[in-house]
Image (tube, helix red, strand yellow):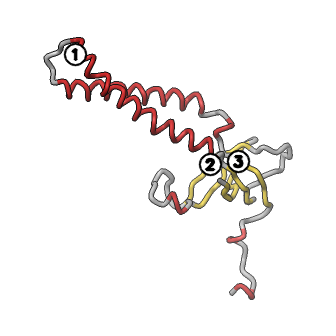
Amino acid sequence: MRREGVVVDRVGDMVQVQFERAESCKHCHACSGQECRALLPVPFADADAAKPGDTVEVEAPDSKIVRLSAISYGLPLVTLLAGVFLGAPIHAALNLSMNAELFCALVGGVFMLLGLLTLHFLDNKWAFRTEFQPRIVAVKRGPPPSSQPKTAKEW
């Protein structure tokens, strides 16, 4: 997926890029306001690449994002179901006086928490891997086309 954004700040070899929210993101309120910002590394050797005010084209690795989403949603679900299905044999083996369905639900909840904890550690491990990060693929000098003054013909 490719999107255009405007560089608003530069800190060392990183730039802060501001994007307008995509139409598919309108229901989500993770970004405050109508714009969201991302801190991205400048991949070019040129020290003057991507200055504030420049428009940049940013590409996100679609296949990696889909895989991470599947892991993020799938792992807790799989661990929950595994806990629920393993709860019945555990309940029978321990010969507990507790309701079997309640015990299965509790074991499922514990397993799901273990799955979420695993996700937390994976997130910390994968957070700085460049293969999952969006990257700048092109820089266009100057302000974005929408902020340039209109000519008489465009009125």
Q: CA distance from mark 1 to mark 3?
A: 58 Å
Q: Residue at x 43, y 30 (%)?
A: 116
Q: CA distance from mark 2 to mark 3?
A: 8 Å
Q: Nearer the viewer, mark 1 or mark 3?
A: 1
Per the image, the residue denoted by label 2 is 38
Q: Amino acid at mark 3?
A: Val
Q: Residue at x 48, y 30 (%)?
A: 119
Q: Nearer the viewer, mark 1 or mark 2?
A: 1
**Residue 30 placement, left or right of 144:** left
Q: N-terminal of the two: label 2 or label 3?
A: 3
Q: Amino acid at mark 2?
A: Ala
Q: Residue furthest left?
A: 97
Per the image, the residue denoted by label 1 is 92
Q: Residue at x 71, y 66 (%)?
A: 144
Q: N-terminal of the two: label 1 or label 3?
A: 3
Q: Residues within 10 Å of mark 1 (few under 14, many from 20)?
A: few
The answer to whether marks 2 and 3 mark residues whose Cβ atoms lie closer than 8 Å is no
Secondary structure found at label 3 = strand
**Residue 20 placement, left or right of 29:** right
Q: Residues within 10 Å of mark 3 (few under 14, many from 20)?
A: many
Q: Residue furthest right?
A: 46
Secondary structure found at label 1 = helix
Secondary structure found at label 2 = strand
Q: Amino acid at mark 1?
A: Ala
Query: Where residue 36 appears, x then y in whole percent?
Result: 57, 54
Camera-side residue: 5 or 51? 5
Q: CA distance from mark 1 to mark 2?
A: 52 Å
Q: N-terminal of the two: label 1 or label 2?
A: 2
Per the image, the residue denoted by label 3 is 15
Query: Where residue 112 appears, x then y in whole percent?
Result: 37, 29
